[in-house]
Image (cartoon, grey):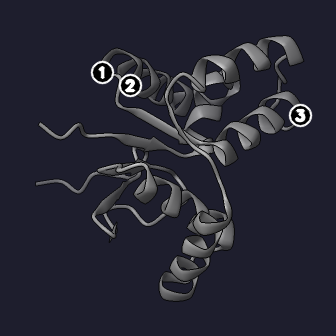
Amino acid sequence: MKDARVFVDTNILVYAYDLSAGDKHDKAKEIIKNLWSTGEGLISTQVAQEFFVTVTRKIAKPLGLGQAKEIVKDLLQWKTIVVDGPLIVDAINIQEKYRYSFWDSLIIASAVEGGAATIISEDLSDKQKIKNVTISNPFAEKAPK
């Protein structure tokens, strides 16, 4: 049985550790908790780097360097895609085709490389499918049935 890897974008991880993020904090924390229990979490070196910089410098109550380092060390236990030359070229191809920013295209390319079924992100187009990976925004309004 193929596992259903879930690539987690930086913003979701940041919300999980940003106590000032309100409802987004609660939702993101639950998502990360579930990914720890299922073992389906997937990140890239880009996400680990962006997360560290954001939680230590850009949130209302920044985390200490030591605490942030320990969180990053934990996250690196997940399957982690290393951003290398071929992946950068893949990201450029995605940028050309789908018109995302380079950095967002690198997120998508990393998810594809890691065999993700889903990317969880607030920044990408909810429900869009790119190369067999579906984007999901957990904060998007769900349409009534």
Question: Residue at left 41%, top 28%?
Answer: 31
Question: Residue at left 66%, top 43%?
Answer: 45
What residue does disc 3 label? 57
Identify whether 92 is placed above or below 18: below
What residue does disc 2 label? 35
Question: Residue at left 39%, top 44%?
Answer: 138
Crowd class of label 2 (few under 14; some 14 to 19; many from 20; radius 10 Å): some
Could you tell which of marks 2 and 3 lies nearer the N-terminus?
2
Task: Classify residue 125 as left or right of residue 90.
Answer: left
Q: Based on the displayed image, in which of its 4 quarters is residue 59 positioned?
A: top right
Find residue 38 and name its label.
1
Q: For the residue marked with disc 2, what is the amino acid?
A: Leu
Q: Are marks 1 and 2 in contact (CB under 8 Å)?
A: yes
- Place of residue 26 in the rendered image (x, y in percent of width and height, measured from the top left): 49, 23
Q: CA distance from mark 1 to mark 2?
A: 5 Å
Task: Classify residue 108 as left or right of residue 64.
Answer: left
Which image quarter is the C terminus in? bottom left
Q: For the residue marked with disc 3, what is the amino acid?
A: Arg
Which image quarter is the N terminus in? top left
For the residue pair 134 and 27, the one nearer the viewer reads as 134
